[in-house]
Amino acid sequence: MKTGLVLGGQVTQEWQEKQAELIREAVANKTPGNTLKDMALANMGLHYAGSDLFNYSQLSRPEYSTVILDTFDVSGQIDNKYGLTRTQLGIPKWQGTPEENSAMVAAVLHFLGSTRVGYVSINENNKKVWFSPDKANRIISWGNVEEPVNTPGILWPGNKLGSLVLPNKCNSLISFVIPQSGISKYHHTALSRAATFLGYAESTIISARLQIFLKTLGYDGVGSDASANNVGFGVLAGNGELGRLNYLVNPWHGALIRKADFMLTDLPLAPTRPIDSGITRFCATCKKCAEMCPGSALSLADGPSWDTLSAQNGLGVKNYTNDWHKCRPWAWAPSPNTVGSCGVCQAVCVFSKLEESSVHDIIKPVVSQTPLFNRFFKRMDDMFNYNNPENPEEWWSRDYKNYPYSRAVPGN
């Protein structure tokens, strides 16, 4: 057992032993508000990602040092060096039914700012949804390993393949949605890019904290560096449908999602089912995102296909094929055409509207039942002039008391 914090030259071992006794007693008695899951939630809040927010590889590296309550360090986190781990306290790992665990994880992610959560049981069929080779030029495989075994590949120079072996024990996947701010409507601006950056940063921080929560309970979490098709698993988990713009689109946020993230885990979870809300059928007749695309990168085809245009298109996916060579000059800053980012396709989506727009309360249930009114609804969306956002300067001088705001969709 650790010796404790030194205050004024006096070792506080006696205080620490009393605290440990109180913790063990509370967990053993399942004291409401002081169970292991409550302590895992509190422990999660002790950590934050404060350095390279885009280094997703950190989320798949269990070799980091064990710290308070059996968590491990993720890049840039602050550790409570004086805490006792769950095993040091003699507390067994969390035990719950898959249904109980699913509800628990959903509550945690909602607390962190994710509005939609679903679960997928990993099997030999959906393992095909992994990219292999992935963005790190690694061949993905599965094995009886306790933690991911990562051998990075090299794209240039040399094009040397690496490998990533994922643990067979992590047979459940948590899919969770990070909403993107409504300021994406100021497309072609740096203001819009702020929404993109915030979404990615929030996703990374939420992933790190979810991993800490799972570790505290006694389970592993392998994050986005596992290189699965995040949109594909978002569809399988029921968090949305694949839209014409090849993003996840759902009835709650439309295409304003950044991003549909995921985490593998060995925590038993109850799988959820895909949804059919009519969005994919709506995309077949709407075409607004493709019509508004400044680079003409989105397909105007009347239906999805298996065709590909380049190596940037995923093989074996039936979708509306994007021309990424036309998209990237607009989407990535800096470019000759924009000081920020594009995001037009996300912002103009008929479903990417604030809930205050009552017309969309009518559209959403109707399109889930019949496609007969899809063209009419698209024309209505045009009539409301959603394509032309107001002056971005108005956002800075908005009435904070009356301006639509949601914790889940920050800074609309």
Image (tube, rainbow, N blue to C red):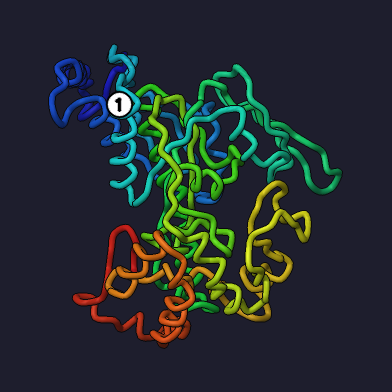
Residue at 32% across, 58% down: 408
Query: Is 226 drawn above or below residue 313 in the view shown?
Result: above
* Residue drawn at x 75%, y 34% as measured from the top left: 162
The part of the image, by quadrant, that contains residue 27 is top left
User: How many numbered callouts?
Assistant: 1
Say which residue appears at 49% left-offset and 54% top-offset.
241
Res. 147 image quadrant: top right
Residue placed under numbered mark 1 in the picture: 83
Residue 354, image x, y percentages: 33, 70
Amino acid type shown at disc 1? Gly
Examine the rendering and report whether any part of residue 202 can be seen. no
If the image is split into quadrants, where does the C terminus sit?
bottom left
Residue at image coords 47%, 48%: 204
Categorize mark 1 by other alpha carbons within 10 Å: few (<14), some (14-19), many (20+): some
Does residue 294 appear to the left or right of 117 in the view shown?
right
Q: In the image, is residue 300 above or below residue 209?
A: below
Compared to residue 321, the image places residue 395 above or below, namely below
Residue 68 in the figure: left or right of residue 329: left
Image quarter of the N terminus: top left
- Which element carries disc 1, helix, strand or loop? loop
Q: Where is residue 66 in the image (x, y as percent from the top left)?
A: 43, 25
Asked whether residue 188 appears in the rendered view, the answer is yes
Q: Nearer the viewer, residue 266 or 321?
A: 321
Question: x, y percentage for residue 152?
Answer: 71, 36
